[in-house]
Amino acid sequence: MLLGLLIPVLVGAGCRSTKTCVQTPFPGLAAELKQANTNGAWLRLLIIHGMSNHTPGYSSNFVDAIGRKLKLTQTGINLAVLTNSTAEVNGYLSTVELTRGATNKLRAYELTWSPANLF
């Protein structure tokens, strides 16, 4: 009986309020890159890992694959150590810049917060 009551609830779940939820199709990174570049801007991609411990660079294969798919070349990389007021490491922010010519620019940010959850 309980299962019969739950099935309509689970099937009907989703966004119900148009004021708080906008469900539009994602056009893809290629379309977003083109749009950003018409304004002379960088397309920014933020990557944050889930649970468990990760080391800086965990998304490098993913970022490389995106670069290949969009025909972009890596032109810059930076790693910033994030610390608190007592100089304890809270995480790392890696920045990778991928470009093609002067107008196709993607900047991928990788946040590694694993040190923050180690006690």
Image (spheres, rainbow, N blue to C red):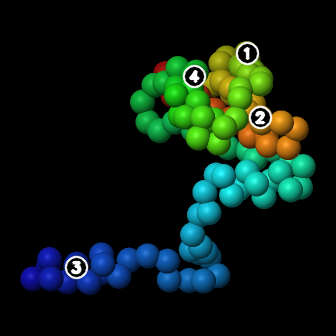
Q: Residue furthest left?
A: 1
How far is the residue under mark 4 from the one under mark 3? 42 Å
In this rendering, the label closer to the viewer, 1 or 2: 2
Disc on the earlier residue, 1 or 2: 1
Label 4 or label 2, whichever lies nearer to me, is 2
Q: Which mark is residue 7?
A: 3
Q: Residue farthest to the top?
A: 87
Q: Tell me the CA gap for discs 1 and 4.
A: 22 Å
In the picture, measured across the screen, residue 58 lies left or right of residue 88, that is left
**Front in this rendered view, residue 14 or 33:** 33
Amino acid type at mark 4: Gly
Q: Which amino acid does label 2 sit on?
A: Thr
Dot placed on the residue nearer the N-terminal end, 1 or 4 = 4
Lateral position of residue 119 relative to residue 35, left or right: left
Q: In which quarter of the image is residue 56?
A: top right
Q: What residue did someone put label 4 on?
A: 57
Rendered view: 77 above or below 102: above
Q: Which residue is drawn at 9% across and 83% down?
A: 1
Q: Which marked residue is nearer to the observer: mark 3 or mark 2? A: 2
**Nearer the N terminus, badge 4 or badge 3?**
3
Residue type at mark 3: give it. Answer: Ile
Q: Name the residue under label 1.
A: 87
Asked if residue 110 lies left or right of residue 6, the reply is right
Q: Where is residue 41 in the image (x, y as percent from the top left)?
A: 86, 48
The secondary structure type at the circle numbered 4 is loop
Q: Where is residue 5 in the image (x, y as percent from the top left)?
A: 20, 83
Q: State if disc 2 and disc 1 touch (CB < 8 Å).
A: no
